[in-house]
Amino acid sequence: MTAVLVPAACAAIDDVAARVPPAGAWRPVWRKLRRRRSAMIGLVVVVLFVAAALLAPWLAPFDPIETSWSAIRKAPSAAHWFGTDDIGRDVLSRIVWGTRASLLAGVVAVSIAVALGVPIGMTAGLVGGFVDALISRLTDAFLACPFLILAIALAAFLGPNLTNAMIAIGVSATPIFVRLTRAQVLNVKVEEYIEAARALGNSPFRIAWRHVLPNILAPVIVQSTLAIAAAIIAEASLSFLGLGQQPPAPSWGSMLNTAKNYVDNAPWMAIWPGLAIFLLVLSFNLLGDGLRDALDPRQR
Amino acid sequence: MIEFLVKRIATILPTLAFVSMLIFGLQQLLPGDPAVILAGEERDPNVVAYLREKLHLDDALPVRYGYWIGGVLQGDLGESVRTQQPVLDLIVQKLPVTIQLAVMAMMIALLIGIPAGIASAVGRGTAWDVGANAFALWGLSTPNFWLGILMILLFSVQLGWLPASGYVSPFENLRENLAAMIMPAFVLGNAIAAVLMRHTRSAMLQVLNADYVRTARAKGLSERVVVLKHSLRNALTPIITLGALEFGTLLSGAVLTEQVFTIPGFGKLIVDSVFNRDYAVVQGVVLVTATAYIALNLLADIAYFAANPKLRA
């Protein structure tokens, strides 16, 4: 870049800098992503689960919480495709409705983590100095507590229910986003277009919002997709331990918790909810891996 | 080396201080008066008064933290409301069980993860690579409590080969102990094997393209020697450092695995204390876990530093 900048050139640079990742920049990503069969399979399965969650009232053949004393632990049949549970509820209906808890937990928890982690990470990266040191040490402290154990502790102190489980998972996942964002900001910060934007007298907030944020978005999106997978497992784990969705509301984790007591005489109670978790998590992982390959050329 | 150690330890101290504040702060999340909640269902006014006094609840927050951390530094993690036992004793009792589980799981993970990673990197693009990657995805996407239930279904219920639960101390009967621990260890090791496979694969891919490996090949060394001696040895350092980070996954996983197989370890302790509203035990477990994690990462860093001559220069 030349040392002397005329105002018009500055404006042009500012303009270009702001438009570095315009909406159109995503088109090649989508093209690359579309070529990855595994990522596309992941995307399709995720969409199917989202549809199941939205259409649960119409898709589920039975009421998910209605008990039937005449249909206790019945093996899969024409009437109950996935069988019934220990108090005669239809397993298929509970799985369809349980999709809501799992997807909601995954998306809400990760939204919390992104909403907290990205601004904090940007502050650390952009402000630097003492603020950075403080945020980094705090992040280390959070990361030192194993993810699920921290989530269990938070859920325990907040009280066991789905909302608190989502908060606990979201807060526990935040430090990863802080660290990722900070590292990305440090890379982007030294780029010439940021310097140009600063030279033009843009406010730090505007630089952060218009110039830094769009350029660090790609890894954040990849991490979010993978974090949704982890959050879904975490919600299932908390519910399995009794710290998430409370009975009788359906959740895959709590279904497995009950199912483990009946492995010897009603194995279908354990097989289907676990398979649902596995498929949904696998799909998010496939999608996340595909996005990473499409967005990050170094991975290939 | 000394300089590195001093610097590294200097960054740990504030982290440990923050960890302790974080864990102490958990108490603030309790809705309502901690003394009343900690007193349990009975809410005996004497117990409430005793707890209020003992936890210094009438003092300001920083003062209370001072009392608490002062105790922690002397090994006093408080006492269980349920059993009146010191929390540290409870943890020390349960810890060996979880350590055995974790060590067995790590061994299984290394035995599966590293060979799979090597096969995948060496045979890049072949069926081996596809198979190893599929295994890694399976490992990362399977909730380990579900895998545990499925294994119980197969090996305990259907085949009757292994007990579904019933922990026996290795000092009492080693055979029965191993029979009870092998399934949980496999379940726990499975997810870590997946992560290790991915680390091994990428570390090996990087090394296999290095000049010294090309030289080794050009010298006419056998592929076996090139892969195992020249490549793996160099790839191993990042694998071990990244592997140490999996310690957290191991402990998180142990909570669930111990729950599925009813193993009386550390994880069972935290879950039971959550349901008994035994908050001091929950705090103690998190504190010990986090401290162990920080210490282990320090060791991994030191090992990395010691093993890498480039960093010492």
Image: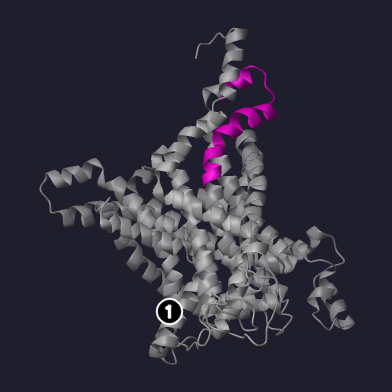
The reply to whether residue B287 is visible in this rendering is no
In the depicted structure, whether residue A33 falls above or below residue A41: above
The residue under label 1 is which amino acid type? Met
Q: Is the magenta stretch mostly helix, strand or loop?
A: helix
Magenta region = A194-222
Residue A250 pos. (x, y %): 66, 70
In the depicted structure, whether residue A214 falls above or below residue B70: above
Considering the numbered disc 1 on the image, is that residue within a helix, a strand or a loop? helix
Residue at the spot 22% in from the left edge and 57% down from the top edge: B228
Task: Depth check: give the residue in front, A141 or B132.
Answer: B132
Residue A137 pos. (x, y %): 61, 49
Count up the numbered dots.
Answer: 1
Residue at the spot 57% in from the left edge and 75% down from the top edge: A256
The reply to whether residue A45 is visible in this rendering is yes
Coloring scheme used: one colour
Residue B111 pos. (x, y %): 33, 68
Q: What subunit carries mark 1?
A: B
Task: Depth check: give the residue in front, B100 or B165.
Answer: B165
Q: Circle 1 sits on which residue?
A: B183
Q: In this view, does A295 lie to the left or right of A9?
A: left
Residue at the spot 50% in from the left edge and 75% down from the top edge: A271
In the orientation shown, which residue stands out farthest toward the bottom? B172
In the orientation shown, which residue stands out farthest toward the front? A78
In the depicted structure, whether residue B79 falls above or below residue A237: below
Q: Is residue A166 left or right of residue B259?
A: right
Q: Does the magenta-highlighted stretch encompass residue A221? A: yes
In the orientation shown, which residue stands out farthest toward the left? B220
User: Would you identify the image quadrant in which residue A144 lies?
Assistant: bottom right
Q: How crowded is mark 1: few (under 14 residues within 10 Å), some or many (20 or more)?
A: many
Q: Does the magenta-highlighted stretch encompass residue A81? A: no
In the depicted structure, whether residue A212 falls above or below residue B169: above
Residue A52 pos. (x, y %): 60, 59
